[in-house]
Amino acid sequence: MNFHSKAVHAGDRKRKAGTPIPVTTPIHTAASFFYDSLESIDKVFAKEIEGYAYSRYDNPTNAALEELVSSLESAHGSLATASGMSALQIAITAALIDRRKHVLAANAIYGATVKLLQQVFEPFGTTNAFVDICDLDAVQKAIDTDKPGVILMESVSNPLLRIGQIDKIAEMARKVGACLIVDNTFATPYLQQPFKYAVDFVFHSTTKFLNGHGTAIGGVLLGKDLEFMKTKAWKWHALLGGNANPFDAYLLTQGIKTFELRMERHCSNAMRIANYLNDHEAVRFVNYLGLQSHPDFAIAHRQMKHPGAMMSFELKGGLEAGKRFIDKLQMCIRAVSLGTVDTLVCHPASMTHYGVAKAEREKFGITDGLIRLSVGIENIQDILADLEQALLD
């Protein structure tokens, strides 16, 4: 099946002899499951036979979601988690078990990821370093110097829209036995599939484009090593209790059924808006992978199907002009998060990167005046009209 057919059908309609087959995977809200004999349930707990015993370990609704997302990412195993941060925590924890406790991360990444590394993992003895993931010489130097156990990057960075060469970084990681983890939330499996470049783990905040409607928090961790995913990764997943809620998993599977259709509209709208902002006299600069002025335009063209639905920009009037613009919006929504059918406008310095020190933010290029735009699927003329009236002084 091609991508859209997988999005519609994968994971659904599990067959069980003698029973009707639901067209859509139902919501299994049971905390536990019973069997005809103690021997059977013992075998399920021991993973000698397939089955469900307790929903913190496995759940039929979550399993359908895991099969669905695995098919879209061409992964061998996946775990549905309570959030993207939960998926990342499991990935780092599992990856560091047998490796040096040092994480080399991209320097322009999601603020909560920085805080997870510094405030959760560092107190347990893990060390961290940050590098410009787009500078391959700098990445190689950091690898040679620190010998990291884990390399962490975003397929498209938040919020500056930088993109590293995943294939070359994966090759660097393999040479030193490091585990490469890629956050593919911004790009989505429709626009970019990191497993084609032999990465070890991919994770998503499924709250964003995969759900698409802002109805549920969720995450998914995907791995290329099925045995590892079924053993060590699953063990940490079960013990940490970061499993997805079955109702949220159900909402996510429903959102994914229209995923390709939404992404095409997201991307076509975004290209129009990026060109509009880039030509506007009030705009100082625009970060969008579809503009030839973007430093990673050529890499994005090689690695991605479309430039995506995310962009960031700054007005010539700086922070105060940005505040006025955001407050004047009438249809576009002032809110954190991204990837929903609505066009969402975010101020990274006070929202997504609020907990990151100003000096550290600015070192990475996240200025106080930066505005992040997640382009929705509304009528393009309505989005442009709202932006235009908000840009007028």
Image (spheres, helix red, strand yellow):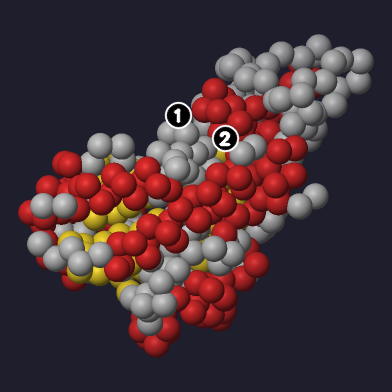
Whether residue 297 is visible, yes or no, is: yes
Q: Which mark is residue 255?
A: 2
Graded by Cα atoms within 10 Å as few (under 14), some (14 to 19) or many (20 or more), the crowding at tag 2 reads many
Q: Residue at x 68, y 34 (%)?
A: 64
Mark 2 belongs to which amino acid? Gly
Residue situated in front as seen by the camera: 344 or 265: 265
Measured in 3D between alpha carbons, the distance from the residue under mark 1 to the one under mark 2, in whole angstroms, is 9 Å
Image coordinates for residue 359, horizontal then vertical, percent: 12, 65
Residue shown at 15%/59% (left/top)?
369
Q: Nearer the viewer, residue 296 or 91?
A: 296
Mark 1 closeness class: few <14, some 14–19, many ≥20 residues within 10 Å: some
The residue most toward the left is 320
Q: Position of residue 344 (x, y in %)?
A: 33, 43
Q: Are marks 1 and 2 in contact (CB under 8 Å)?
A: yes
User: Which residue is labeled 1 in the image?
Assistant: 215
| Element carrying mark 2 | helix
Lateral position of residue 94 relative to residue 51, left or right:
left
Residue 43 shown left or right of residue 80 in the figure: right
